Image (tube, grey):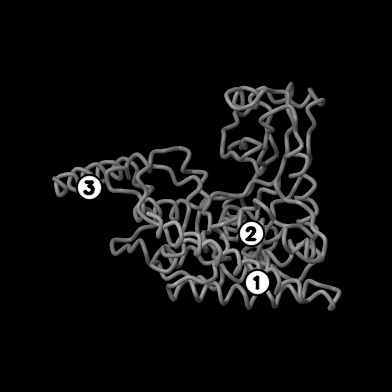
């Protein structure tokens, strides 16, 4: 029966690709999904794709839900560069906190020489509930949000993180969606919004039974199986946490670390010199603005300020536990996990010492790491105790 199901799935896929040949445009006959993904998911990797240059929000163009969190629902508009997070309720302390922490953390990153490859979305503005003209101007947004939010409500407008390019999305589907669901996954519109969550603290990656890759969870065991450069991810995450802890003076609670695309300024600066003067055409622009894979940090609604002392470290440790499974975990058994933790600890200490202006406080990052070790030790002891009682 299993062979029959596999044959049926293959037939469905062949028929689907016959109708949509563009999906195979980036896949040669000897296409190897795993090796292709290894190359494409490198940080700052330039991916050939359609143009990503964007426009401002349009009044008469429909909006579409592209994500949601604990306190807000996120909408986007095709062809524009903004994401609009609408508060789920009229009481908006989370969205206000998101706005303040977003600005503070972005400023800390911009003023630091650490985590230069890590990106924070630009934060445009917070529209309060009382500004009713906003929703009158964008009735299409009201229509899109009616199932999730009561409008008018507060709106946080930020830069939209570009979804992973089509070759990456197709690779994820072919590698991790069960064959019987792959056709549906290719056709699912929500998958066009795919971002990849980096779960460096989890070895639980496996085949997905659903058809969704909108917020794809890439676990450490999958990164290892793909042969990805795990050290580069760990390095950027360690640097980002160091900036958020010691530059921005926050606990980084609830933030997400995702792989997403962005228009390539790198490509522009390195290729425009090849063009003849005054010959830049629309086609040239579309070629020059190609997506680059970056590590992004987002969702700051739960972030709290900390003091640079032992109480602040305790809050940062608690927040890191809440952010599990993004951060590598100590005291694990496999070589992959041990390497990820060791490299994270070394780089976190290095970047934290660079971030701390007061050298008398350089013991605090070590306290943070010790706190993570102690918490993991207690968790494992609790697991052993629970297992013994069964």
- Element assignment for label 2: helix
Earlier-in-chain disc, 3 versus 2: 3
Element on which disc 1 rests: helix
The image quadrant where one finds the C terminus is bottom left
Mark 2, residue position: 320
Q: Nearer the viewer, mark 3 or mark 2?
A: 2
Asked whether the residues under the numbered discs 3 and 1 touch, taking CB atoms below 8 Å apart as contact, a structural biologist would say no
The residue positioned 69% from the left and 28% from the top of the image is 89
Q: Residue at x 73, y 39 (%)?
A: 94
Residue 95: x and y in percent read 73, 39
Front residue of this view, candidates 345 and 238: 345
**Label 2: few (<14), some or many (≥20) within 10 Å?**
many
How far is mark 3 from mark 2, CA to CA?
43 Å
Give the labeled residue for mark 1.
370
Q: Is residue 181 above or below residue 204?
A: above
Residue 371, percent from left and from top = 65, 67
Front of the two marks 2 and 1 = 1
* Of 160 and 227, the residue lying toward us: 227
Q: Which residue is mark 3?
A: 10
Q: Position of residue 65 (x, y in %)?
A: 57, 34
């Amino acid at each position: 029966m299993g062979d029959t199901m596999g044959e049926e799935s293959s037939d469905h896929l062949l028929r689907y690709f016959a109708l949509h040949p563009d999906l195979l445009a980036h896949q040669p006959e000897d296409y190897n999904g795993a090796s292709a993904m290894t190359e494409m998911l490198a940080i700052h990797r330039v991916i050939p794709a359609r143009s990503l240059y964007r426009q401002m929000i349009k009044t008469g163009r429909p909006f579409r839900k592209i994500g949601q969190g604990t306190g807000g629902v996120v909408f986007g508009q095709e062809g524009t560069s903004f994401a609009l997070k609408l508060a789920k309720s009229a009481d908006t302390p989370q969205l206000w906190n998101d706005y303040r922490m977003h600005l503070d953390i972005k400023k800390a990153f911009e003023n630091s020489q650490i985590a230069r490859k890590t990106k924070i979305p630009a934060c445009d503005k917070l529209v309060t509930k009382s500004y009713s003209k906003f929703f009158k101007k964008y009735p299409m947004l009201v229509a899109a949000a009616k199932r999730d939010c009561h409008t008018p409500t507060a709106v946080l407008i930020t830069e939209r993180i570009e979804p992973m390019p089509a070759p990456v999305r197709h690779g994820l589907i072919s590698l991790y969606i069960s064959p019987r669901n792959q056709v549906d996954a290719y056709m699912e519109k929500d998958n066009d919004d795919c971002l990849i969550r980096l779960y460096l603290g989890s070895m639980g990656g496996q085949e997905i039974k659903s058809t969704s890759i909108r917020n794809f969870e890439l676990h450490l065991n999958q990164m290892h199986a793909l042969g990805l450069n795990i050290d580069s991810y760990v390095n950027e995450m360690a640097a980002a946490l160091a900036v958020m802890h010691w530059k921005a003076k926050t606990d980084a609670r609830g933030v997400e670390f995702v792989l997403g695309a962005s228009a390539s300024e790198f490509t522009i600066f390195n290729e425009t010199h090849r063009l003849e003067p005054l010959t830049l055409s629309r086609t040239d622009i579309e070629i020059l603005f190609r997506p680059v894979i970056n590590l992004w940090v987002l969702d700051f609604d739960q972030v709290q300020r900390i003091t640079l002392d032992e109480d602040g470290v305790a809050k940062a440790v608690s927040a890191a536990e809440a952010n599990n499974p993004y951060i590598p975990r100590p005291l694990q058994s496999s070589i992959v996990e041990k390497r990820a933790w060791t490299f994270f600890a070394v780089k976190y200490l290095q970047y934290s010492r660079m971030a701390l202006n007061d050298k008398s406080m350089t013991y605090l990052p070590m306290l943070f790491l010790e706190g993570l070790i102690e918490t993991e030790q207690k968790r494992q002891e609790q697991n052993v105790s629970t297992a013994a009682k069964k």
